[in-house]
Amino acid sequence: MKIIKNIGCLVGIVPEGVDRKTGSEMDEVVSISDAFLTIENGLIKDFGPAETCPEASQADEVTDAEGGMVMPMFCDSHTHICFAGSREQEFIDKINGLSYEEIAARGGGILNSADLLHDTSEDDLYSQTMERVLEMIRKGTGAIEIKSGYGLNTQDELKMLRVIKRVKETSPAIIKSTFLGAHAVGRAYTGRQEEYVDLVCSEMIPAVASEGLADYVDVFCDEGFFSPAQTDRILEAGERFGLVPKIHANELACSGGVQVGVSRKALSVDHLERTTEAEIEALKGTGTMPTMLPGSSFFLGLPYGKAKTFIQAGLGVALASDYNPGSSPSGDMRFVMALGCIKMKLTPEQAFNACTLNSAYAMGVSDIAGSITKGKKANLILTRPLPSLAYIPYAHQSPFIKKVII
């Protein structure tokens, strides 16, 4: 048994069986001041006030938190960190006034990453991806969803997913894998989008399933990418092979993707920079988690998702990084939490829940991660002494992590 003692504040306590927070529940972050926590076999065994802490003689290892906070590690339910190289030239293009859509129309964006990935070996791609995973862990993230989608042909999509599987097997973080063959239309199918959708449904998805390479299937349902009808067809094909739906939607326009996702019982619908009351009504009473990506809004200058409005309507909200080479080149979930507060006007408590328990739910791991709960994995951030939870997003560039346990 391991003991963490002298915890100034144990933050993010959630009862067993609670898998997400919605509406006013997102205002609640339960904590214990002057606390302890014990770990056994990598799981949280017990916690409580310091006066009930077991004797050090009962432990194999004792960690002194020295008055710092202990909190669950962040969960990042939407990333594209399996990519090759970088796209800083497009960063310069944006500075010079080109839009995301204009860069894509010139053959840049996702297609640029697909070209780079095609010329990169599996071993090199694995090394680059693991470097990003370890960077995210150092910054406090303990669970990461990773998408394919820079292959855009069967062999390169499989290459990506094999790399993600290797990361899952070798990383200390919890990893979930998503097949996103419908991220864009591959260059070989320019002008033949329906044929590309045929390829995704009839060749890619069966090949992915035959090797057991993905947990989820995702589609970029948005203006200039895939239509609601095409999205529905791809999700239905994925479901036949046991892949749970997720959705990219409403980044560039109100695309109808949220409604398709809800109809297919998607685990999450992600982006949501542009939404109306219709999307809120569609999500009410469902198991689908609206997931917003403020890092993408920050980097591209897009509107921020209406997280506050969603919560006021009784919904839960998750936040994720969208870590990718073109529109959100950062996996710092502490910064995502800060953007949630600064730009989306979430309270620190709401942003904390959106980056921990709700983001764990959005990637299907809230039964094992995202909160301080007995029996969950002991994926923990130990901070230096902090005045409050609000200090974390407030002083968003000041180092706050003393240690991670994963």
Image (cartoon, rainbow, N blue to C red):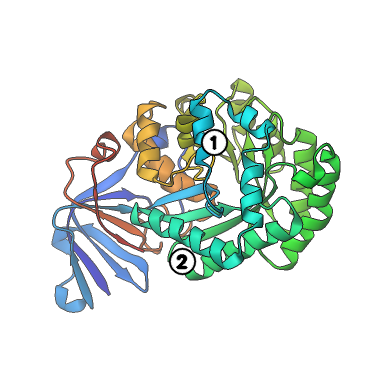
Check disc 2 and report its element: helix, strand or loop. loop
Q: On the rendered structure, is 60 left or right of 122? A: left
Mark 1: amino acid: Glu
Q: Which mark is residue 90?
A: 1
Residue 137 is situated, as x and y percent measured from the top left of the image, at 38, 57
Q: Quadrant of the N terminus?
A: bottom left
Residue under the point 46% across and 66% down: 171
Give 356 or 146, whichever is nearer the viewer. Answer: 146
Q: Quadrant of residue 241?
A: bottom right
Check the image and report above or below for 108 versus 35: above
Residue under the point 37% across and 74% down: 41
Give 94 or 178, whichever is nearer the viewer. Answer: 94
**Does the image show residue 304?**
no
Q: Quadrant of the C terminus?
A: bottom left
**Does the image show residue 356?**
yes
Residue matched to label 2 = 171
